[in-house]
Image (spheres, grey):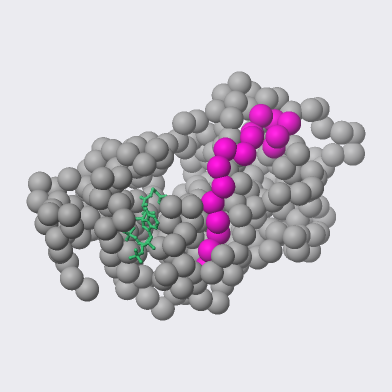
């Protein structure tokens, strides 16, 4: 695969994203209206790999990253081309580079409308819509008398959280969950001594993001997200979910987290998304993504 090419009279070359200043990456994401802080870019680089497209004077014109989860699965994200160079093949070039570097895996990603044609042309199949819900959080209703009892998670819960996440996500993402856990406040629901639902919440973008959230029952998912809504009452809170029916999206809307945008989960290979409609006491599903890039 060529390392450099001419794009609209610019000499553009591909470089490792690990070597680029965070403020230049942040300028790229701001140029397409994304909320990532320098810290959010730093985190994506700690858990993933990727490339940038640079011009002759090292301006960052594009990016694409992949995040390994185990040996045979990866998510793809942070795919951006600077608005002034879009529709000239830079996105496709970076994506092919990422697919070559991570070859032999199954993939999942969150596609914006702008990127649908690109991913379709690379063979990705649509799975399910993601609803990006966000806004000023509003303290939720007091829990009903029969609501599941929730407790704050501690360091000793990490193994149970990782195992429950793996059942919902389809593959264990041990290192990633440990890193998220370290910078999050978490809540969980236990039944018969086993963790059956959890939520993590951490600083991200314009405020805080709740995710991942895993549960089998809507009432458990509501129970583990409620304390985060209460803690961020009056502040910006975001949650990305595949759920579009049942108690969970109603609870989000009542809590001030309105649908701001949608993206489409797509996959390539043989590891499609676990259908959230299959959720139940013995079938935990992902109620909220960690981020769109990480799934
Ligand atoms: C999505 C994005 C990365 C695409 O990058 P790009 O460099 O413009 O993409 P390319 O030029 O390589 O185009 C690849 C394919 O996408 C399609 N495409 C790109 N721009 C398009 C446009 N303006 N209108 C319609 N289709 C378009 C075409 O099918 C093209 O294939 P072609 O070679 O057959 O024409 C870019 O639009 C972007 O950064 N958007 C904002 C951020 C974003 O949404 N990122 C995606 C996250 S999932």
Range of the magenta residues?
Answer: 252-267
Answer above or below: position of 202 versus 287: above
Answer above or below: position of 285 versus 35: below
Q: Position of residue 207 (x, y in %)?
A: 50, 30
**Total labels drawn:** 0
Looking at the image, which is closer to me, 177 or 56? 56
Look at 34% across and 37% down and name the residue there.
Answer: 30
Q: Position of residue 16 (x, y in %)?
A: 23, 58
**Image quadrant, ligand 1:** bottom left
Q: Is residue 149 magenta?
A: no
Looking at the image, which is closer to me, 223 or 32? 32
Q: Is residue 266 magenta?
A: yes
Look at 55% across and 28% down and name the residue there.
Answer: 236
Q: As drawn, is 175 to the left or to the right of 83?
A: right
Q: Give the farthest residue toward the left.
A: 56
Q: Position of residue 37 (x, y in %)?
A: 37, 36
Look at 82% across and 42% down and name the residue there.
Answer: 148
Looking at the image, which is closer to me, 62 or 45? 62
Look at 28% across and 61% down and name the residue there.
Answer: 89
Q: Position of residue 17 (x, y in %)?
A: 26, 54
Q: Quadrant of residue 247?
A: top right
Q: What predominant SS class does the magenta segment belong to?
A: strand
């Amino acid at each position: 695969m060529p390392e450099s090419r001419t794009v609209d009279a610019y000499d553009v070359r591909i470089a490792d994203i690990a070597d680029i200043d965070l403020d230049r990456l942040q300028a790229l994401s701001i140029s397409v209206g994304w909320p990532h802080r320098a810290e959010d870019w730093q985190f994506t680089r700690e858990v993933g790999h990727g490339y940038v497209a640079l011009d002759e004077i090292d301006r960052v014109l594009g990016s694409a990253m992949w995040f390994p989860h185990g040996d045979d699965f990866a998510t793809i994200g942070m795919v951006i081309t600077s608005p002034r160079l879009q529709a000239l093949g830079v996105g496709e070039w970076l994506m092919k580079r990422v697919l070559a570097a991570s070859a032999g895996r199954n993939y999942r990603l969150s596609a914006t409308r702008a990127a649908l044609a690109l991913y379709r042309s690379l063979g990705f199949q649509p799975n399910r819509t993601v609803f990006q819900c966000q806004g000023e959080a509003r303290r939720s209703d007091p829990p009903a008398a029969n609501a599941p009892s929730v407790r704050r998670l501690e360091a000793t819960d990490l193994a149970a959280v990782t195992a429950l996440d793996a059942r919902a996500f389809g593959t264990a993402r041990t290192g990633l969950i440990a890193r998220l856990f370290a910078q999050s406040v978490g809540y969980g629901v236990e039944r018969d001594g086993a963790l059956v639902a959890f939520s993590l919440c951490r600083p991200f973008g314009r405020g805080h993001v709740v995710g991942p959230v895993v549960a089998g029952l809507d009432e458990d998912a509501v129970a583990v997200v409620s304390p985060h809504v209460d803690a961020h009452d009056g502040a910006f809170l975001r949650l990305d979910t595949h759920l579009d029916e049942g108690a969970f999206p109603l609870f989000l809307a009542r809590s001030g987290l309105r649908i701001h945008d949608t993206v489409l989960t797509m996959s390539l290979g043989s590891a499609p998304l676990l259908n959230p409609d299959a959720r139940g006491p013995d079938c935990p599903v992902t109620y909220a993504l960690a981020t769109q890039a990480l799934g």
